[in-house]
Image (tube, rainbow, N blue to C red):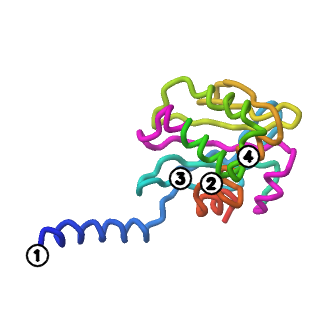
Amino acid sequence: MSIKSTVLLPLLILISTFALSPINAAEAPSSMEYQGTKLMLNGQGTRVKFFMKVYDTSLYLGSQSSNSEEILSSNEAMAIRLDVTSTMVTTDAMKDALNTGLVKSTGNNTGPITEEIEQLISTFNSDVTDSDFFEFIYMPDAGTNVLKNSAYIDTIPGIEFKKAFFGIWLSNNPIQKNLKKAMLGG
């Protein structure tokens, strides 16, 4: 057996095993309450990058929905919870990933929400560990509240920012298609 075969065969076995094995998200809370508004878990999934679980993402809505366009355009309370599961996720990695996701979500048209994106990026000013969780809770007439481990950080105003932000996972160009499907309850 050649050296090439010795290296490639185990790698191919690992990749095929990984591809066949579902990556299950950690158990997310079935509901959340924020400022007197109760939201129910709609769906959740796992973000995978370079064959590793990076974070689990959960979508919370007032009522179940599998229609991403309606969710994105809705001016109703909703939330995304992001549970960090990997040490690969750092403060800088979060900033880069969110910025990249917003560019994808908006079809490379972030100009109208540049200030809001800068405000979001500025909320990531402390270390991120693999046990942290972030909640991004949109409240009509207020904006998207950013919380880390249930501690309030900031509120980013505007429904256009909310559409772009939630679009990272739910747009027609999401960061990971099977994650979108999972968050929509599929």
Between marks 3 and 1, how big is the CA–CA gap? 37 Å
Label 4 neighbour load within 10 Å: few <14, some 14-19, many 20+: many
Q: Read off the residue under disc 2.
A: 44
Marks 1 and 4 sit apart, C-alpha to C-alpha, by 52 Å
Q: Nearer the viewer, mark 4 or mark 2?
A: 4
Is residue 72 within the magenta segment? yes
Measuring from the top left, give residue 156's x and y in whole percent.
75, 30
Q: Above or below — where is 23 with respect to 138?
A: below
Instruction: Give the residue type that dot 1 points to.
Output: Met
Residue pointed to by mark 4: 164
Q: Disc 2 vs disc 3: which is toward the camera? A: 3
Label 1 Cα neighbours within 10 Å, binned few <14 / some 14-19 / many ≥20 = few
Question: Do callouts 2 and 3 mark residues in contact (Cβ within 8 Å)?
Answer: no
* Along the viewing direction, whichever of 88 and 93 lies nearer the viewer: 93
Q: CA distance from mark 2 to mark 1?
A: 44 Å
Q: Position of residue 153 (x, y in %)?
A: 67, 24
**Residue 164 magenta-drawn?**
no
Q: Earlier in the sequence, mark 2 or mark 1?
A: 1
Residue at image mark 3: 47
SS at mark 1? loop
Q: CA distance from mark 4 to mark 2?
A: 19 Å
Name the mark on residue 1. 1
**Amino acid type, residue under disc 2 in the picture:** Gln
The residues colored magenta run 66-94
